[in-house]
Image (spheres, rainbow, N blue to C red):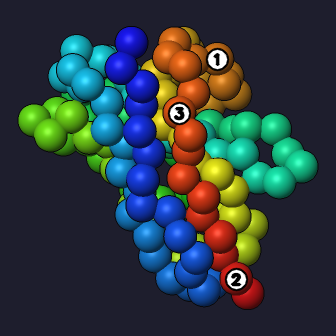
Amino acid sequence: QVPLVESGGGLVQAGGSLRLSCAASRLASINVMAWYRRAPGKQREKVAIITVGGSTTYVDSVKGRFTISRDNAKNTVYLQMNNLKPEDTAVYYCNVPVDPDLSSTLVLRPWGQGTQVTVSS
């Protein structure tokens, strides 16, 4: 399988914004995509999902601040992150979830390298 490739992370001050990108081959054939993150010393968590029809779901901690979107023609999934907080600091990954439930982190593809997001206070 072609690996998923995340990009767009960086260092930003609290209150700032970043847009992450995830390159996923044959995206139009993938029903559900998700963004995950792993903060230092914590388990990986699923933060947002999007269906092929554009329906979205977010974990409570990012609702109103993060927006997931997809462009099937460009084979890219995005995560627009606004009003970033220090607690958003983590490595962010995209993947194909086994279960769209936010509590599940089982995935169908190998994990990519992720992209580091660091939010300073």
Give the Cα distance between marks 2 and 3: 25 Å
In the image, residue 33 sits, relative to residue 119, either above or below, namely: above
**Can residue 7 be seen from the camera position used here?**
yes
Residue 23, image x, y percentages: 32, 38
Residue that numbered label 2 is attached to: 120
Residue 92, image x, y percentages: 58, 49
Residue at (70%, 38%) from the top-left corner? 45
Residue that numbered label 1 is attached to: 106
The amino acid type found where label 1 is placed reads: Leu
Q: Is mark 3 on a helix, strand or loop?
A: loop
Quarter in which the C terminus is drawn: bottom right
Residue at (60%, 64%) from the top-left corner? 117
Quarter in which the N terminus is drawn: top left
- Comparing 109 with 83, the one in front is 109
Residue 65, image x, y percentages: 50, 66
Q: In this view, does 98 lie to the left or right of 53?
A: right
In the image, residue 26 sits, relative to residue 77, either above or below, namely: above
The amino acid type found where label 2 is placed reads: Ser
- Comparing 25 with 88, the one in front is 25
Nearest-to-viewer mark from 2 and 3: 3
Q: What element carries label 2?
A: strand
Q: Considering only order in the chain, which callout, 3 or 2, is on the residue closer to the N terminus?
A: 3
Give the Cα distance between marks 2 and 1: 30 Å
Nearest-to-viewer mark from 3 and 1: 3
Marks counted in the figure total: 3
User: Residue most toward the left?
Assistant: 73
Q: Considering only order in the chain, which callout, 1 or 2, is on the residue closer to the N terminus?
A: 1
The amino acid type found where label 3 is placed reads: Gly
Residue that numbered label 3 is attached to: 112
Q: Considering only order in the chain, which callout, 1 or 3, is on the residue closer to the N terminus?
A: 1
